[in-house]
Amino acid sequence: MKLEELLKKRSGNVCELSGIGENLVAYEVPPAQNKGVDSWILINEKCLRQIEKKEELDDVFWKNFLSTSMWSEVPAVQVVSWRLLNRFRNESWAADALDMMYLEDENLEWAKATGDHTGDGSINFHKDSNGNILQNGDTVTLIKDLDVKGSSLNAKVGTAVRNIRLVHDNHEQIEGKIDGQAIVILTKFVKK
């Protein structure tokens, strides 16, 4: 039987974290444990985007599910639940759940292996002036005339900047080209 079929059978064809029955994908819980189906879970795409930090965490969404999924008998589901609860550990509901949760030593070691539990859980996304999340390769429009430092270039409002690159260590800056010149632009001066 294929991996996805085994996961669907195990989960009853619903997300093993949220119980949602649509847009399901197989997800191998990192780091790979080579345990076959036991290191995989079936999850909804929204859950996957938030687990992989491609979307902001929605505490209202997770509050409804994590207090149930943490009791799963599937170790991979327990590990992901523990990691997510740690991202929300400053919320009283998550702190209470973590106090109640128990993981076998081997599974706790697996859960800690990514280091996801050490930060405060916040993720800084590059966002435009309207709060939309920016990605590498996006096209943005300037919302303000900008004088480019060290140049005579004056970028006018409404100028399109194509194929932007996110500045890795500063979520308030992007890189792009205007009139063939590569410049750094503050995200608060662009819209998607």
Image (cartoon, rainbow, N blue to C red):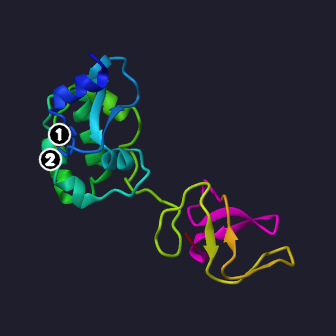
User: Where residue 189 appears, x then y in whole percent?
Assistant: 61, 77
Disc 2, disc 1: CB below 8 Å? yes
- Residue in the picture at 38% in, 48% down: 49
Up-down relation of residue 126 to residue 53 (above or below): below
Specify the amino acid type for callout 1. Met
Specify the amino acid type for callout 2. Ser
Q: Nearer the viewer, residue 54 or 84?
A: 54
Q: Nearer the viewer, residue 84 or 129?
A: 129
Task: Provide the residue designation for mark 2.
Answer: 67
- Residue in the picture at 39% in, 42% down: 116
Secondary structure found at label 2:
helix
In magenta segment, residue 130: no
Q: CA distance from mark 2 to mark 1?
A: 6 Å
Residue farthest toward the right in the current orientation of the protein: 152
Task: Provide the residue designation for mark 1.
Answer: 70
Up-down relation of residue 148 to residue 52 (above or below): below
Q: Quadrant of residue 55?
A: bottom left
Query: Which span of residues is magenta-colored?
Result: 164-190
